[in-house]
Image: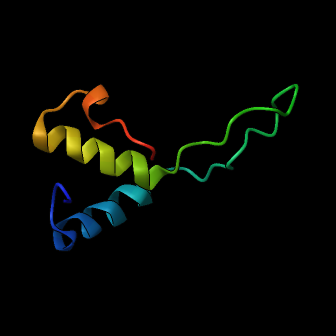
Amino acid sequence: MPAVPASLIEPLWVQFAALLPDRSVYQPTHPLGCQRRRVDDRIVFDKLVEVLRFGWSCEAIADAT
């Protein structure tokens, strides 16, 4: 169940995404080139909204995403 209806969250995501800089999935300057992939910005945004909406801790909303 989403924390906020899609009709409200999509405009917020569009405005939030416009503020984010363009970044690659991997950091190309890593000396070994063996780092983990970055977590998608949309997933982080959705989890942040859940924390703000429900007041849960980060451990409470942790899942496979």
Q: Is residue 37 above or below residue 29?
A: below
Residue in the picture at 22% in, 27% down = 57
The residue at 20%/59% (across/down) is 2
Q: Looking at the image, which is closer to me, 8 or 22?
A: 8
User: Among all residues in the image, which is located at the extreme left?
Assistant: 54
Please tell me which residue lies in front, 13 or 2.
2
Q: Classify residue 54 as left or right of residue 40.
A: left
Tally the numbered discs.
0
Residue 31 drawn at (x, y percent): 87, 25
The reply, left or right, for residue 2 in relation to residue 21 is left
- Residue 54 is situated, as x and y percent measured from the top left of the image, at 11, 40
Residue shown at the point (35%, 66%) measured from the top left: 14
Residue 13: image quadrant is: bottom left
Q: Quadrant of residue 11?
A: bottom left
Q: In this view, does 30 lie to the left or right of 45?
A: right
Question: Which quarter of the figure is the N terminus placed in?
Answer: bottom left
Residue 29 location (% of width, % of height)? 82, 33
Q: Position of residue 12 (x, y in %)?
A: 26, 61
Residue sitting at the far right: 32
